[in-house]
Amino acid sequence: MMKKKIDIKNLAFIDLETTGLNPVFHEIIEVCIITHDSVYNTKIQPSRISSADKDALKITNYNNKEWFDSPKFKDILPKIQQLTAGRMLCGHHVSFDHAFLSEQLSRSGAPCLFDRRRIDTVNLAFEHLKPLGLESLSLDSIRTFLGWSKEGAHTALKDCKDAKRLFMYLSQFGPLERAKLRLKRAFNGYLIEGGK
């Protein structure tokens, strides 16, 4: 169980979909930010699609038709600043999102207003679920392990919602929750729906 309770108002759950893995060469093409009182999700029109990694575009289901009318990053920058200002970023492999967002803000000449500290749900999954038999720390593996749907996976909205769901579930993960999960997995059923 987490030793110090974190006020959810101080968190900005985030997930980014990108054109590759390198924040210097690739760019953000979808963002989702969830705070205690709002959900913001939008596709972002890439400016350098020719430098995109084809595998990354396949995973994110990028296509010109769906992204054609999307805003440019500079158009949504004020909204991103508003939602993240003073908050800790929380997500699954959040260092990836942090690196891309920091690079994109720097390129736009805008400061990073979010808290320098971050919370990674990968660490929570490693601490609480790995000892119970979780083999991989990927979000898809965790969904399978907990019996959560994968529908919509690899979109910023679904991944961000599930990162928040995982945080909420594991931040209160004590002996009772551990026993319930063991029971659920032992019977290979869905007797208890965790993390609702």
Image (cartoon, rainbow, N blue to C red):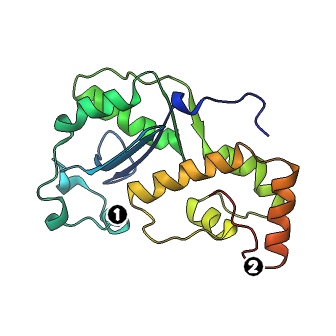
Q: Residue at x 62, y 58 (%)?
A: 196
Indicate left or right for 159 with 131 as reference: left
Q: Nearer the viewer, mark 2 or mark 1?
A: 2
Q: As rendered, which of 52 and 167 lies closer to the eye? A: 167
The residue identified by callout 1 is 60
Residue 95 position, x and y percent, is: 51, 39
Q: In the image, residue 138 lies at what x, y percent?
A: 59, 59
Instruction: From the viewer's perspective, tell me whether residue 126 is left or right of residue 80.
Output: right
- Seen in the picture, residue 84 relative to 191 is either above or below; the reply is above
Residue 195 image point, x, y percent? 65, 56
Give me the residue at 75% from left, 79% from top. 189
Q: Secondary structure at mark 1?
A: helix
Q: Horizontal placement of 191 versus 104: left or right? A: right
The percent coordinates of residue 124 (x first, y second) are 69, 45
Residue 178 sits in which quadrant?
Answer: bottom right
- In the rendered view, tell whether residue 162 sits above or below residue 59: above
